[in-house]
Amino acid sequence: MINALAEQQLQEHPKVLEEWEPLSNKVKKTSKKRNYLAHFSLHRHTKNGVVELRLRPSIHDSRPSNKDYGVEELRQFKITFRKLHEELVKFHDKLKALDLP
């Protein structure tokens, strides 16, 4: 729905529309990752006397997964999410400058 609106509103601005398409794909991909992580649960793991916290699929999540994320992986997700946010803000600023209806 958002893509249809972007195509309709930006038809007179093809260069901006070209920028939107890969950005839209990033939003979809990142949204799927965020939604997937939102249903994980926090687990405490002790290895060689060191306690580590990890995100793992919830026992209530019926989707098959053997994924398991530690602090470093979560930091990378945070960097990815923040970078996408910055790209969206820049794109938004371009849209404001176009003075669309």
Image (cartoon, rainbow, N blue to C red):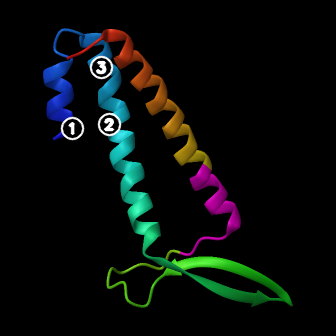
Residue 34 lies, with reference to residue 27, above or below; the image says below
Q: Would residue 7 be found to the left or right of residue 27 on screen? A: left
Look at the numbered disc 3 and give the secondary structure of its residue. helix
Residue 71 place in picture, x, y as percent: 69, 66
Q: For the magenta stretch, what is the residue range?
A: 68-78
Q: Would residue 14 be found to the left or right of residue 80 on screen? A: left
- Residue 24 is marked as 2
Question: Quarter of the image containing the N terminus?
Answer: top left
- Residue 18 is marked as 3
Please state which amino acid type lies under the numbered disc 2. Ser
Look at the numbered disc 2 and give the secondary structure of its residue. helix
For marks 3 and 2 on the same chain, the one whose residue lies earlier in the sequence: 3
User: How many numbered marks are there?
Assistant: 3
**Mark 1 Cα-neighbour bin, 10 Å: few <14, some 14–19, many ≥20:** few
Residue 61 place in picture, x, y as percent: 36, 84
Q: Do the numbered discs 2 and 1 sit on residues whose CB atoms are within 8 Å?
A: yes
- Residue 2 is marked as 1
